[in-house]
């Protein structure tokens, strides 16, 4: 079996494991107050954003354990839990709110590096049916700030470096520039596009 098929199979298994664990733990999680409106109605169907966020928290708690092991088999990496951010919005343009989680991983390989990641849980209206994830920015990759969810993208302003040489990044006078980058799902695949 090819590497791509193994990856898809492992994420299918991961989603099933997360789904079972999340259903078992659902009664243990209390609803937290957030700045989000509590619900949205699209095409005469009511979606409870708090319920979607609650489900995303349960899924994420299982996902992160497996993701850290995948990123760093040596066991040095850890998640900086205070940096977790949960959002609800449509990122695959099907009209159904999905869940987006931003999180940071530190210490991969025992070093002092860190990376900001995004995981997107795709919602079919009743349950999460797939997930996609990516590194957004981190050590020697530039800085970024989450802007919001719009037009099917989780959007970031990324301050990127104009040089690929790490020594240039440390020298004064190397110009950098901001790019607006969107992460979305199209035809069940992750897309990363520059937003104009």
Image: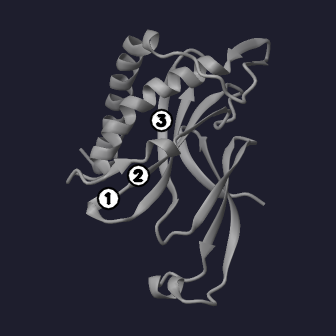
Is 35 left, or right, of 161 in this rendering? right
Q: Position of residue 178 (x, y in %)?
A: 70, 69
> Do the numbered discs 2 and 1 sit on residues whose CB atoms are within 8 Å?
yes
User: Secondary structure beneath disc 1?
Assistant: helix
Q: Residue at image x 61%, y 42%?
A: 186
Q: Which mark is residue 108?
A: 1
Quadrant of the rendering where the N terminus is positioned: top left
- Tell me how far mark 3 sits from mark 2, CA to CA: 18 Å
Is 151 left, or right, of 164 in this rendering? right
Q: Residue at image x 45%, y 42%?
A: 81
How many marks overall? 3
Q: Residues within 10 Å of mark 3 (few under 14, many from 20)?
A: many
The residue where tag 3 is placed is 131
Colouring of the image: one colour
Quadrant of the rendering where the C terminus is positioned: bottom right
Viewer-side label of 3, 1: 1
User: Secondary structure beneath disc 3?
Assistant: strand
- Tell me how far mark 2 sits from mark 1, CA to CA: 7 Å
């Amino acid at each position: 079996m090819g590497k791509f098929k193994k990856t898809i199979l492992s994420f299918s298994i991961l989603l099933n494991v997360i789904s079972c664990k999340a259903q078992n733990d659902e009664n243990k999680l209390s609803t937290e107050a957030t700045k989000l409106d509590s619900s949205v109605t699209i095409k005469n169907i009511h979606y409870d954003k708090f319920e979607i966020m609650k489900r995303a928290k349960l899924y994420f708690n299982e996902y992160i354990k497996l993701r850290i092991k995948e990123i760093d088999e040596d066991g040095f990496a850890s998640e900086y839990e205070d940096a977790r951010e949960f959002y609800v919005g449509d990122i695959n343009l099907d009209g159904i709110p999905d869940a987006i989680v931003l999180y940071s991983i530190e210490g991969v390989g025992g070093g002092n590096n860190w990376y900001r990641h995004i995981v997107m849980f795709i919602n079919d209206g009743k349950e999460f049916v797939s997930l996609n994830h990516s590194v957004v920015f981190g050590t020697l990759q530039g800085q970024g700030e989450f802007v919001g969810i719009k037009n099917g993208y989780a959007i970031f302003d990324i301050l990127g470096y104009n040089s690929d040489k790490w020594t240039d990044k440390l020298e004064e006078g190397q110009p950098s520039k901001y790019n607006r980058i969107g992460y979305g799902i199209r035809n069940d695949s992750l897309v990363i596009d520059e937003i104009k």
